[in-house]
Amino acid sequence: MPLRAAAATCLTMAGIGCVATSAAAQELAAGPGSDLVARACSNCHSIDNVLQVRKTRADWDTTVHLMVNYGMQMSDGDMKIAIDYLSSYYGFQARPPSK
Ligand code: HEC
């Protein structure tokens, strides 16, 4: 019975497996715009979609506009806040062109 087996594993791993799983439930880094992003970006998919990726500012800009194409409702001002937030907390610096 797979369900029972899963529960047994969970008990065996108590303190490791199960706690680790709930600790892994991710939350956005607190910062200006995190409330907005938490609210607006978890409507259609898990916020994990957002937390698992790192993008340059240009790519976040593209992504947020893409979400608008998918049907997201967000004002231009909020989009700027979201892009600022995402690129500061979930961005990475594009490597400067080597000379
Ligand atoms: C109207 C629905 C909707 C909203 C709201 C929404 N998304 Fe999405 N998002 C999608 C769909 C549809 C996909 C593509 C299918 C998938 O990967 O789940 C997607 C995929 C993604 C992906 C994975 C693909 C990629 O380009 O890396 C990221 C990251 C993402 N969304 C970020 C965001 C962020 C950030 C916000 C808030 C600004 C947001 N989403 C709000 C619908 C939405």
Image: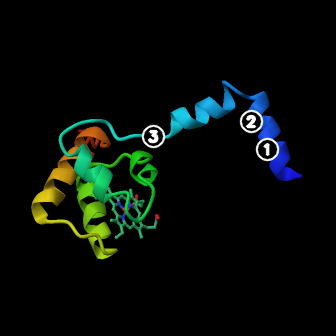
Q: Quadrant of the C terminus?
A: top left
Residue name at image x 44 percent, y 54 percent: 49
**Mark 1–mark 3 distance (CA, rounded to whole Å):** 23 Å
- Left or right: 84 in relation to 98: left
Q: How many marks?
A: 3
Q: Relative to 68, say whether 85 is above or below.
A: above
Q: Amino acid at mark 3?
A: Gln
**Disc 2, disc 3: CB below 8 Å?**
no
List the residue tagged with mark 3.
26
Q: Amino acid at mark 2?
A: Cys
Q: Relative to 82, say whether 90 is above or below.
A: above
Mark 1 vs mark 3: in front: 1
Question: Which class describes the residues within 10 Å of circle 2: few (<14), some (14-19), or many (20+)?
Answer: some
Question: Which class describes the residues within 10 Å of circle 3: few (<14), some (14-19), or many (20+)?
Answer: few
Mark 2 vs mark 3: in front: 2
List the residue tagged with mark 1.
6
**Disc 1, disc 2: CB below 8 Å?**
yes
Is residue 40 at least partly visible in the picture?
A: yes
> Looking at the image, which residue sits at the far right?
1
**Could you tell me which secondary element the residue under label 3 belongs to?**
loop
Measured as percent of width and height from the top left, residue 78 is found at 15, 58
Disc 2 or 3, which lies upstream in sequence? 2
Residue name at image x 79 percent, y 29 percent: 12
Q: Nearer the viewer, residue 4 or 35?
A: 4
Disc 3 C-beta below 8 A from ligand 1? no
Residue name at image x 76 percent, y 32 percent: 11
Measured as percent of width and height from the top left, residue 10 is found at 74, 36
**Mark 2–mark 3 distance (CA, rounded to whole Å):** 20 Å
Ligand 1: quadrant of the figure: bottom left
List the residue tagged with mark 2.
10
**Mark 1–mark 2 distance (CA, rounded to whole Å):** 6 Å
Disc 1 or 3, which lies upstream in sequence? 1
